Amino acid sequence: MSKSKTLINELLVDVFNNILSIEEEVLRSRGIKLSMKEVHILEAVRSAKEPTMSNIASKLRITTGTLTTAIDRLVAKKFVERYQEESDRRKVLIRLTDSAHEVLKEHDLFHNEMIDEIFEDLNIDEDEVLLKSLENISDYFKSKY
C-alpha cells in the first residue's frame, strides 16, 4: 500500500474509533447504560420514515436477524416497543419510548458539543478545502456502500 493510502486508512480508522470511544465514554458519564450499537439503533428508529424491522436493518446495514436480537434487548430494557399498524395488522413497527428519547437527547447533545469544539479549536469553518474533502469522502461512502 502506498504511503498516502496507508495514511488515509489510518486516519479514517483512527477518527472513527476515537469518536465511538469518546462518545461511549461521555454518554456513560451522563448515565446512559446502553452500548453505542444500541444508541445507534435508537437513532435509526427515530429517523426511519416507516420504522419496520427491514427498513431499520437496511438503514443500519445489518440483517433483520441481528436487528431482532438487538430490538428484543431494547424492548426488555424498555427503550422501544413493537406495535402493529392498524391498516395492516401483519406489519410490525418499532417506536421509541420516553426513555429512548432521553438517551437520544443526550446523544444529540454530545454530537453538537463535539462539532462546536471542533469548529472552535480548529477553525474548520474557514477551511473550504477540508470541508469539501470531507463532503467528498462522505458522498463517496454513501454512493459506494
Image (tube, rainbow, N blue to C red):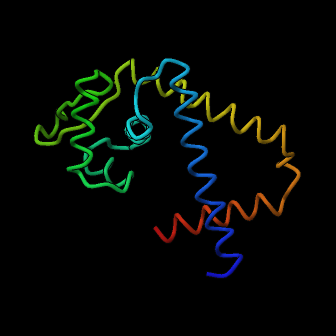
Q: Residue 49 appears at what percent x and percent y? A: 38, 44
Instruction: Please state if 137 lies on the left or on the right of 32 as rendered.
Output: right
58 or 107: which is nearer to us? 107
Reply above or below: 101 against 141. Answer: above
Instruction: Please state if 26 lies on the left or on the right of 69 as rendered.
Output: right
Q: Residue 89 appears at what percent x and percent y? A: 11, 37
Q: Residue 120 appears at what percent x and percent y? A: 84, 37
Instruction: Please state if 40 lies on the left or on the right of 52 as rendered.
Output: right
- Image quarter in which the N terminus is found: bottom right
Count of labels in the image: 0
- Residue at 40 percent across and 28 percent down: it is 34
Residue reaching furthest to the bottom: 2
- Residue at 39 percent across and 18 percent down: it is 99
For residue 93, what is the image quadrant? top left
- Residue at 75 percent across and 63 percent down: it is 132
For residue 38, what is the image quadrant? top left
84 or 110: which is nearer to us? 110
- Image quarter in which the C terminus is found: bottom left
Q: Residue 106 appears at what percent x and percent y? A: 55, 24
For residue 115, what is the image quadrant? top right
Reply above or below: 88 against 100. Answer: below
- Residue at 82 percent across and 49 percent down: it is 124
Residue reaching furthest to the left: 90
